[in-house]
Amino acid sequence: MGYKLYATLPTLSALGEIGKPAKLYTYLRVGEDIFDLFGFATQEELSTFNMLIGVSGVGAKVAVAILSTVSPSKFALAVVTNDVNTIKQASGVGPKLAQRIILELKDKFKGADFSDIPGEEVVGGVFESGNEAVSALMVLGYSPQEAKRGVSGVDPSLELEEVIKLALKKLIR
């Protein structure tokens, strides 16, 4: 017996050689004439997929397209920072759908930790290497540009909490 399995591009590249065992986290979609199996290399990817299909207007295949374009952590960052352009890069996602995704999922990513995202993974270098103050401001709802502006000019040798306090004072003015 064989199954057709839909997977993201990162999952397909993580599978390794043909014929070798592979572990996937799966989601089975069953409907009237539907029996689709989706596979993911990580639980984070599966969890993000489940969140995406919960958004009205986002089907399973669009969710796979989004996760083929951006990693789950980069997707979460795009939602938190209202980065419509990152989300709409996926096939089948226009600006209105990207905005709906952000609107419906923003609360689910409040308080998320983005410090482990590699700098090269973030388009436009939103996080300079180790700049946790910028990421903290973005989690608080500031855009990447506002967060960078707030942190600019603040002595980077200060404690993280102090850098954030000074940046917030600067942004509130």
Image (cartoon, rainbow, N blue to C red):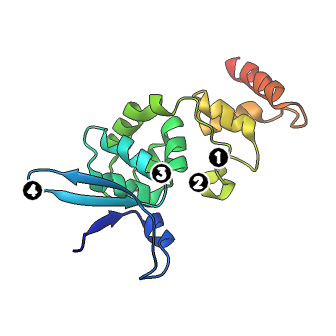
Q: CA distance from mark 1 to mark 4?
A: 44 Å
The residue at the point 49 percent across, 47 percent down is 75
Residue pointed to by mark 1: 126
Is the C-beta separation of discs 2 and 1 under 8 Å?
A: yes
Secondary structure category for the residue under label 1: loop
Q: Position of residue 33 (x, y in %)?
A: 9, 56
* Amino acid type assigned to the residue bearing label 2 in the image: Val
Residue 68's tag is none
Q: Nearer the viewer, residue 118 or 19?
A: 19
* Amino acid type assigned to the residue bearing label 3 in the image: Gln
Mark 4 or mark 2: name the one nearer the start of the chain: 4
Mark 1 or mark 4: name the one nearer the start of the chain: 4
Q: Quadrant of residue 81?
A: top right
Mark 3 or mark 1: name the one nearer the start of the chain: 3
Examine the rendering and report whether any part of residue 9 can be seen. yes
Mark 4 or mark 3: name the one nearer the start of the chain: 4
Closer mark to the observer between disc 3 and disc 1 = 3
Is the residue 166 above or below the residue 35 in the image? above
Secondary structure category for the residue under label 4: loop
Residue pointed to by mark 3: 43
Closer mark to the observer between disc 4 and disc 2 = 4
Q: CA distance from mark 3 to mark 2?
A: 24 Å
Closer mark to the observer between disc 3 and disc 2 = 3
In the rendered structure, the answer to whether residue 163 lies left or right of residue 112 reads right
Residue 123's tag is 2
Q: Position of residue 85 (x, y in %)?
A: 45, 48
